[in-house]
Amino acid sequence: MNLIFKVLAVALLHAAFYVSYPATGPYGDYYLAASLLVWAVFILFINTSANIVRLISGLAGIAVNLAAFALIALALAATMPQRDRISVLEKLQKGKYPDRNAISTGLLRFGIHLDRDVGGAVKNVVDREAGKALNKLKED
């Protein structure tokens, strides 16, 4: 079960980079699929090593897993294609972090309309709370 969570964490890490820096160009989808496959296989091998190390020291096993995920994040940031030919790692080093528009554009790739979904949710909450307030006023 632990291995499944690690593979899902690899997928989540890829999705986070993919959403945060969506200007991947025409080969971004291919890169995402190939990278996800390569790093999932890497985690399969590292999981065995981490389990062996964990027999000796539980903390060392955790350190191996954290180092593996740090390596994955660094490799993604260094190799993820971008239209402007500036790597994500260079953007992070220069302090160019993703803004709301970039994340909204990235979420659109997964079919999530951030502005519409958040606006509708806020409207529903406001309507519900206003209804509760009106009912309370009617009771008083």
Image (cartoon, rainbow, N blue to C red):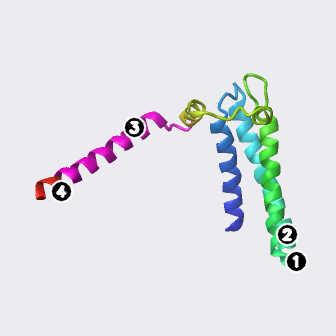
Marks 3 and 2 sit apart, C-alpha to C-alpha, by 46 Å
Residue 113 makes an appearance in the image: no
N-terminal label among 2 and 4: 2
The kind of secondary structure element at disc 2 is helix
Q: Position of residue 2 (x, y in %)?
A: 70, 67
| Element carrying mark 1 | helix
Quadrant for the N terminus, please: bottom right
Asked whether 65 falls inside the magenta stretch, the response is no
Q: Amino acid at mark 2?
A: Ala
- In this view, the residue farthest toward the top is 84
What residue sits right under mark 2 in the picture?
A: 60
Judged by depth in the image, the label closer to the viewer, 3 or 4, is 4
The number of callouts visible is: 4
The residue that appears at 78% across and 41% down in the rendered structure is: 76
Q: Mark 4 highlights which residue? A: 136
Among numbered discs 3 and 2, the one appearing first in the sequence: 2
Magenta-highlighted residues: 109-134
Q: Are marks 2 and 1 in contact (CB under 8 Å)?
A: yes
Measure the C-alpha gap from mark 4 to mark 1. Answer: 62 Å
How far is the residue under mark 2 from the one under mark 1? 8 Å
What's the residue type where badge 4 is placed?
A: Lys
Picture disc at residue 71: none
Q: At which x and y percent is residue 31?
A: 74, 36
For label 1, the crowd category at 10 Å Cα-Cα, with few meaning under 14, some 14 to 19 and many 20 or more, is: few
